[in-house]
Image (cartoon, grey):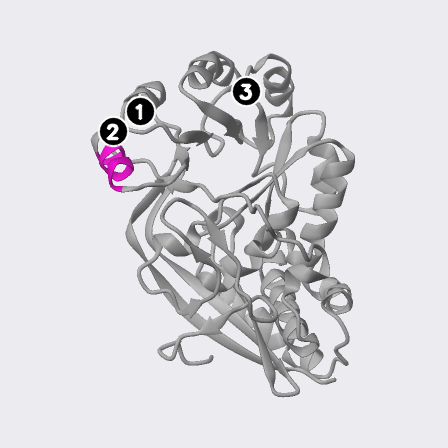
Amino acid sequence: MKLALNLYPVTLQLKETFTISRDSYNQRRSLIVALSADGETGYGETSEHSYYGITIEKLIDRAESLRPVIEHYDFHSPELLWQFLQSHLHDLPFLQCAINNAAYDLYGKLQGIPCHHMWMPDVRGLIKTCYTISIASTDEMVEKIKKLNFEIYKIKLGTNHDLEIMQQLRQHTDAVFRVDANCGWTAEQTIEYAPVLKELGVEFIEQPLPAEDTIGMKKVRLQSVLPILADESCIREEDVEECAPYFHGIVIKLMKCGGITPALRMINKARSLNLKIMCGCMVESSVGISAIAQLLPLLDYVDMDGALLIDNDPASGVVIQPDGTVTLPTTNGLGIRLNHSSPQKS
C-alpha cells in the first residue's frame, strides 16, 4: 500500500529551564512525522539536539527530499520500511526514528493491535519511570523534590558540589536515586564518589565520563562500587557490543539509534551480553514517549518523563501517574492522538 507523508513542526515549551552539565534550555523544537494509508495515520517524533548536530531545518529538509521515495514505497511492515530507508538515513537516525515509529503506529492501527503485542502481549507489572531533576541551585533542586511524589528520581550532576547536592536531596525523600553526570566527571571522581552515592541510595551512575574516554571507563568499570550505564557511549546497534567491556548496562534512546526497529535488536544483543537495559528519552511530547512505552515489558529501567517536562503537549497517549506508574494505551498502534490544537503541517 502507498503512504502519504505529512510533517508537523512544533516548539515544545518546558515548564522550567532544564540544565545538564553541558547545556541549558527552556524550549525544544520538535518534528512530528505522520504516515497515512487506508484511512489510518501513524505518528512518530524527533527533535533538534545541539550535542548531535541536529536542527529542525535539517530534519525537515531531509524529510522533504525523501517524500517521493516514501510516497512511492509499497508499505508492508515497519521493519522493511526501516531497511529500505537506511541507505538514505544512515547518517540521520533522528529522522529515521520518527518515520520508523510512525510506521509502527500505522501498522498497529491497520492490524488492529497495540504495538507491544507484537513482542510482549502480557504487560502486567510494568516498571515505573523515574523523574529527572535537572541542575539548579541546591535549594531549587530540594524544593522540586519536596513538591513531587515519584518513587525514583534521576539527578543530573556535573557541578563542583555534586555530593553536597545528593546529601541535601536525601534528607527530603526516601525515593530511589539514579545519577546522570552527562560526561561531566573524571574516572577518579567517579570512583571516589561512588561509595558515598551508594550510601545515599543511588542505584547506578549513567555516563560519568566522556564517550571517548575508554581508558578511564575501563578503570571505572573495575573499581566503581556502583553499576555504570552507557548513554552517550551507546548510540547505535554496533555500540552495544563495544560497551560490554566498560559498562554494566546500556541506555537506549530511540532518536539516537533510529527507532523501535533497531532498539529491539539492541535489546536482544544486550541480553545476550548480560547487560542491563534502560530506555531513556529526550525532551519530547507524548508522541515520542508513547513509542518508548511500547518497550516497557522488555526493559530493566526506564526514563520516559519527557512529556511531563513540557507545558504544551500536542498529543495524548501513554499515561504517567504522579508516582511514576505507567499505564499503556489500550488503543491500537502506539496509542497516540494529536490534540485538536496540534500544529499545522509543514
To which residue does mark 2 refer? 138
Q: Position of residue 165 (x, y in %)?
A: 31, 24
Q: Position of residue 319 (x, y in %)?
A: 44, 58
Q: Position of residue 132 (x, y in %)?
A: 39, 41
Front position among marks 3 and 2: 3
| Mark 3 neighbour class, 10 Å CA radius: few under 14, some 14 to 19, many 20 or more | many
* Tag 2–tag 1 contact (CB < 8 Å): yes
Is 83 on the left-hand or right-hand side of 288? right
On screen, residue 38 above or below 231: below
SS of the residue at dot 3?
loop
- Residue at the location (48% across, 60% down)? 318
Q: CA distance from mark 3 to mark 2?
A: 23 Å
Mark 3 vs 1: CB contact within 8 A: no
- The residue that appears at 41% across and 80% down in the rendered structure is 344
218 horizontally vs 309: left or right:
right
Q: Is residue 11 visible?
A: yes
Q: What residue would you read off at disc 3? A: 226
Residue 313 magenta:
no
Q: Amino acid at mark 1?
A: Ile
